[in-house]
Image: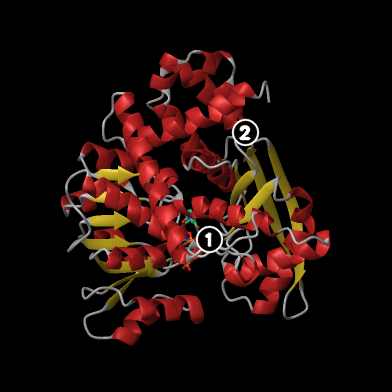
């Protein structure tokens, strides 16, 4: 069962027929189509011109072999993906993910979401996503480098600063981007700084890019709270994950006076009622590349670690929940628990971390709910600012870049809120984000002919 308007049912049936076996992609398409009934009532030509079908079909999908040699001299094989989803607004733009769960359906869902997210920023960037089923955990620096070089040896021919511009995602941070950009530069014999974002400052990166996704989500939730004359001050906040997005969410929430009492990785979560010690967390995760249990071991006292099989981080009572790990990490059951514990706002730092059931529970309970395609758009928005700096051979201060980020996030918040009002669903940020993102892409596609 779904809540898609009857005029759009044949389109969804066709998407299901052509993409069966890709549940995450179908989930992402369903969520967008459920918001579009009111749009096609106003613009029947979106159906007549097959704009929705075209938006649901990636422009190009690339799947390739990645052979590499491990430290024991053994040949390993992984699979690489790049889905160039939509270039109506600009070059394809979206991160690369390294995680054993990666498959074409997951990359398609991420590329589809990315298309609308990038449109919401108001910046000239299309949507794409890539990745590999490579597991970076436990690999040496040498293995990571050889893997990244092999991936780029194939992928480089499909990239370019006017064509397709990747960045990081799960399992891909500054180290991996450096190795991939280095190999791209070598193969092309060009210093094309704008072909990658998330670069280190030393070779063309932007200040505040590393912080941008977590900071951006925090700005978005702050804007939602302000509509209820509230703020982060004194609030108990739970942030899942302990990677790039989670760490900078924790930092910004703390600067706004909130107390982050729990965070996690895939092995379990820690609760520190005094507030997460960010220096210790960063040392464990960014320097030692360790596991979250080490946080509890080193803190001792009342700080405890709960393994993933013994409970969910969403059992921890909080005012604000900011899921920042991965897709479908917050279930309907988790949402019920959060609501019964009095949660007032949820901001999706990760892509699609809440299941559809969880989203409905939050919305029906009147919880302020920020969907990832709006709330975590600060990362890609700052990537676009990095591209601007590369194009003009310039480097902005942290303050200037963060001010631009803050104003972009406020703009996205206001666009989603105004669109929800216009379509008769005040306070529904999911509907607002889906419609505003979709309409921007659809209007551009309409002007470009049948493409
Ligand atoms: P990182 O690799 O830096 O961190 C991911 C974190 O999530 C780790 O703590 C990881 O734990 C945890 N995690 C990953 N998979 C699972 C899983 N299956 N179950 C439980 N925990 C898991 O990635 P990012 O912080 O960059 O990305 C997090 C999310 O944010 C993703 O959904 C990504 O698509 C999204 N995002 C990221 C942006 C960015 O700029 N980086 C931009 C916009 C969205 P462990 O180490 O144990 O695997």
Which residue is disc 2 drawn over? 88
Judge: label 1 CB < 8 Å from ligand 1. yes
**Residue 235 vertical placement versus 123 (above, below):** below
Identify the residue at image location x=60%, y=22%. 446
Q: Is residue 363 visible?
A: yes
The answer to whether 125 appears left or right of 412 in the picture is: right
Residue 439: image x %, image y %?
48, 27
The answer to whether 98 appears left or right of 216 in the picture is: right
Quadrant location, the N terminus? top left
Please report whichever mark, 2 or 1, sits nearer to the chain's N-terminal start.
Answer: 2
Sort mark 1 into few (<14), some (14-19) or many (20+) by Cα contacts within 10 Å: some
- In front of the other: 434 or 110: 434
**Residue 237 vertical placement versus 279 (above, below):** above
Residue 268: image x %, image y %?
37, 69
Instruction: Give me the disc on residue 369.
Output: none
- In front of the other: 59 or 101: 59
- In front of the other: 306 or 388: 388
Identify the residue at image location x=77%, y=63%. 185
* Secondary structure state at the residue bearing disc 2: loop
Quadrant location, the C terminus? top right
Which residue is disc 1 drawn over? 170
Q: On the image, which quarter does residue 402 sit in?
A: bottom left
Q: CA distance from mark 2 to mark 1?
A: 26 Å
* Secondary structure state at the residue bearing disc 1: loop
């Amino acid at each position: 069962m779904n809540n898609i308007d009857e005029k759009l049912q044949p389109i969804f049936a066709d998407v299901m027929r052509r993409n069966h076996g890709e549940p995450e992609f179908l989930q992402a398409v369903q969520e967008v189509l459920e918001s579009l009934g009111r749009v096609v009532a106003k613009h029947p030509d979106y159906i007549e011109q097959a704009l929705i079908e075209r938006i649901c079909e990636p422009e190009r999908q690339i799947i390739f072999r990645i052979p590499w040699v491990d430290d024991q001299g053994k040949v390993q094989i992984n699979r690489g993906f790049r889905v160039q989803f939509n270039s109506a607004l600009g070059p394809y733009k979206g991160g690369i993910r390294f995680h054993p769960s990666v498959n074409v359906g997951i990359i398609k869902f991420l590329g589809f979401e990315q298309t609308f997210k990038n449109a919401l920023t108001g910046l000239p960037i299309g949507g794409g996503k890539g990745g590999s089923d490579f597991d970076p955990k436990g690999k040496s620096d040498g293995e990571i480098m050889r893997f990244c070089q092999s991936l780029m040896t194939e992928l480089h021919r499909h990239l370019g600063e006017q064509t397709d511009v990747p960045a990081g995602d799960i399992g891909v941070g500054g180290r991996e981007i450096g190795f991939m950009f280095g190999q791209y530069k070598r193969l092309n014999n060009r210093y094309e700084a704008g072909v990658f974002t998330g670069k280190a400052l030393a070779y063309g990166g932007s200040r505040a890019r590393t912080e941008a996704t977590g900071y951006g989500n925090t700005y978005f939730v702050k804007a939602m709270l302000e509509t209820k004359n509230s703020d982060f001050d004194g609030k108990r906040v739970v942030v899942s994950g302990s990677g790039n997005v989670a760490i900078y969410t924790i930092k910004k929430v703390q600067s706004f006076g909130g107390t982050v009492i729990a965070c996690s990785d895939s092995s379990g979560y820690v609760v520190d009622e005094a507030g997460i010690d960010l220096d210790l967390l960063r040392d464990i995760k960014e320097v030692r590349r360790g596991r979250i249990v080490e946080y509890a071991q080193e803190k001792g006292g009342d700080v405890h670690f709960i393994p993933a099989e013994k409970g969910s981080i969403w059992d921890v009572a909080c005012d604000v929940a900011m899921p920042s790990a991965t897709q479908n990490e917050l279930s309907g059951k988790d949402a019920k628990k959060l609501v019964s514990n009095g949660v007032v706002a949820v901001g999706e730092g990760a892509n699609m971390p809440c299941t559809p059931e969880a989203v409905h529970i939050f919305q029906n309970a009147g919880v302020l709910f920020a969907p990832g395609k709006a709330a975590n758009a600060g990362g890609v928005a700052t990537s676009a600012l990095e591209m601007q700096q590369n194009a003009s051979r310039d480097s902005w201060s942290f303050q200037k870049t963060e001010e631009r980020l803050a104003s972009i996030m406020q703009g996205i918040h206001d666009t989603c809120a105004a669109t929800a009002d216009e379509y008769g669903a005040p306070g529904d940020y999911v509907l607002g984000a889906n419609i505003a993102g979709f309409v921007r892409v659809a209007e551009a596609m309409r002007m470009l002919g049948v493409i």
